[in-house]
Amino acid sequence: MADIQELIRLAAEARDRAYAPYSGHPVGAALVTDDGRAFSGCNVENAAFPLGSCAEQSAIAAMVRGNGRVIAELVVVGPSDAPCPPCGGCRQRIREFAAPDTVIHFCNERDVLMTMTMDELLPEAFGPDQHDNPNR
Ligand code: THU
């Protein structure tokens, strides 16, 4: 079981460094790997709107750079006290490195507001198991 308060702290810290001048919607994500290491990320927008990237995407990139491959738990912190659920694209990105029973917490900067499993977020997912890739 991850230290949720520490993940919330890391996600909120990342959120506070987000570059979101167009949406005004800064987001931070923090995850812990199966071997207990934490990685975080924030959204980075662009004047050419479709080129922006999500907080979850950047946390996953940091994890992969750190040679992490399994997300044990993930926290998302949005700009307000309303839960900030991952977008559809990020649900698929998280699924790449998470099991169906992996939990994702939507938090404000203090508390968990809502928790869902990967399978609830993306049922009947198209995942890595659909590929027979020995390099994985
Ligand atoms: N955003 C994230 O970073 N994560 C999500 O899962 C939802 C959306 C960002 C993308 C964009 O920069 C801003 O929030 C508004 O959509």
Image: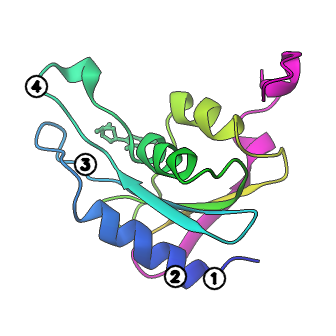
Mark 3: which amino acid? His
Rendering quarter of residue 58: top left
What residue would you read off at disc 2? 6
Q: Given contact means CB atoms under 8 Å apart, are the residues at marks 2 and 4 in contact?
A: no
Number of numbered markers = 4
What residue would you read off at disc 1? 3
Q: Is residue 119 left or right of residue 21?
A: right
The residues bearing labels 4 and 1 have C-alpha atoms spaced at a distance of: 36 Å
The residues bearing labels 3 and 1 have C-alpha atoms spaced at a distance of: 26 Å
- Residue 134 within the segment the image draws in magenta: yes
Is label 2 in a helix, a strand or a loop?
helix
| Residue at position x 10%, y 25% in the image | 47
Mark 4: which amino acid? Ala
Residue 121 rendering spot, x and y as whole percentages: 69, 41
Q: Given contact means CB atoms under 8 Å apart, are the residues at marks 1 and 2 in contact?
A: yes
Quadrant position of the N terminus in the picture? bottom right
Is label 3 in a helix, a strand or a loop?
loop
| Residue at position x 61%, y 69% in the image | 37
Q: Which residues are magenta?
A: 108-136
Q: Is residue 121 left or right of residue 67?
A: right
| Residue at position x 73%, y 51% in the image | 70
What residue would you read off at disc 4? 47
| Residue at position x 49%, y 35% in the image | 87
What residue would you read off at disc 3? 25
Reading the chain from its start, which is encountered first: label 3 or label 4?
3
Task: Look at the numbered disc 3 and say if its residue's Cβ is closer than 8 Å to ligand 1.
Answer: yes
Residue mark closest to the camera, 3 vs 4: 4
